[in-house]
Image (cartoon, rainbow, N blue to C red):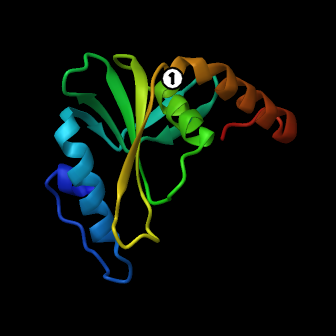
Amino acid sequence: MIESFINHTTYEVSGKYDSQAYADALYDKVNPLVMEYVAIEPHVLSEKLKIHGTADAIVRLKDKSELYCLDWKTGAHKSIAHAVQLAVYAYCWDKEPVTSGLIARVDKKSKKLTVHIDEYPNLSQYYPIVEALRTLWEFCNGDKNI
């Protein structure tokens, strides 16, 4: 939904959930920080590790020179898993290096829709974890693509 807004495309909202309110809150908090949306929902792939995924966005922030991987969350809690997820996307991004990440999260249980932004610098520090997780996956499942 947020990606559709950034790309100026239409998106049907069912009205079943407050997803439009969450998207608005997240976008309103993050957009003033962003100088450029380099890629929206890019599919990223590492042939070396045989892993892939879809990042929410790759951005360049105002007053920063490096690229950031951005992910939107509708959960209240910060997690180390967020850093690993961003590191997977950064590892797989095959263009200008992504060095840092941002998680923009809104607590969907809160009526205030407070947005928290968690910054994860130096995503490469998590690459050994990404590689170890791939090795563990191979150990459990055999050498298959995921």
For the point 42% across and 31% down, which residue is it? 101
User: SS for tag 1?
Assistant: helix
Q: Would residue 51 be visible to someone looking at this image?
A: yes
Which residue lies at the image location 72% right of the left edge and 31% below the top edge? 134
Query: Which residue corresponds to the image point at 31% horizontal and 82% vertical from the top-left?
Result: 15
> Between 82 and 15, which is closer to the camera in this rendering?
82
Pointer 1: what residue?
123
Position of 143 compared to 84: left or right?
right
Q: How many marks?
A: 1
Q: Residue furthest left?
A: 8
In the rendered structure, the answer to whether residue 144 lies left or right of residue 146 reads: right
Question: Looking at this view, is 31 or 53 the one in front?
Answer: 31
Nearer-the-camera pick, 51 or 125: 125
Q: Is residue 16 above or below residue 44?
A: below
Residue 89, x across and y down, in percent: 48, 32
Q: Position of residue 122 (x, y in %)?
A: 48, 19
Counting from the top left corner in percent of width and height, residue 123 is at 51, 23
Asked if residue 22 lies left or right of residue 108, the reply is left
* Placement of the N terminus among the 4 image quadrants: bottom left
In the image, 112: left or right of 143? left
For residue 91, above or below residue 14: above
Instruction: Give the residue displayed 42% in from the left and 41% down from the top.
Output: 55
Q: Where does the image place residue 103, in percent across and percent down from the top left?
A: 43, 42
